[in-house]
Image (cartoon, rainbow, N blue to C red):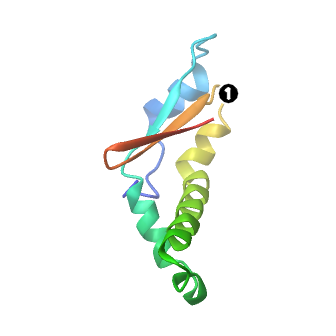
């Protein structure tokens, strides 16, 4: 995720656009998502930065999830014929699955 505007590769376009995988679910893995958290913290308003630490981090995490879903690669893959069923967001050593 440190290459936030990375283009979707031709292989990814072919995989999600042409190959029907039937009932086999595909999971899309986004790595280095902590970069989005840094970006989300930087984008907080001065008032949000004055919130108690836990509230500020929660707000930034919420905004980072929005940034992820606005990622051009995510948006493009979702519009393809066979998009992934779920995605996994990797941050450091932690993984979160969003259904």
Q: Pick the residue in front: 96 or 84.
A: 96
Relative placement, left or right, of 84 versus 53 is right
Report x, y in % for residue 22. 63, 10
- 10 Å neighbourhood of mark 1: few (<14), some, or many (≥20)? some
Q: Is residue 23 above or below residue 91?
A: above
> What residue do we see at 41% from left, 68% from top?
38
Report x, y in % for residue 65. 57, 55
> What residue do we see at 58% from left, 81% from top?
48
> What residue do we see at 45% from left, 61% from top?
36
Residue 20 position by quadrant: top right
Q: Which residue is mark 1?
A: 81
Report x, y in % for residue 68. 55, 54
Relative placement, left or right, of 46 versus 42 is right
Which residue reaches farthest top?
22
Report x, y in % for residue 4. 44, 58
| Secondary structure state at the residue bearing disc 1 | loop
Q: How many numbered tags mark residues here?
A: 1
- Say which quadrant the C terminus sits in: top right
Q: Pick the residue in front: 51 or 12.
A: 51
Q: Pick the residue in front: 59 or 28.
A: 59
Which residue reaches farthest left?
93
> What residue do we see at 53% from left, 47% from top?
73
């Amino acid at each position: 995720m440190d290459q936030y505007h990375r283009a979707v590769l031709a292989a990814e376009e072919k995989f999600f656009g042409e190959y029907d995988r039937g009932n086999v679910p595909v999971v899309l893995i986004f790595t280095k998502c902590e970069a989005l958290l840094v970006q989300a913290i930087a984008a907080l308003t001065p008032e949000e930065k004055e919130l108690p630490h836990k509230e500020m981090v929660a707000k930034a995490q919420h905004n980072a999830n929005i940034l992820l879903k606005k990622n051009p690669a995510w948006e493009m893959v979702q519009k393809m014929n066979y998009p992934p069923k779920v995605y996994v967001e990797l941050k450091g050593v932690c993984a979160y699955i969003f259904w």
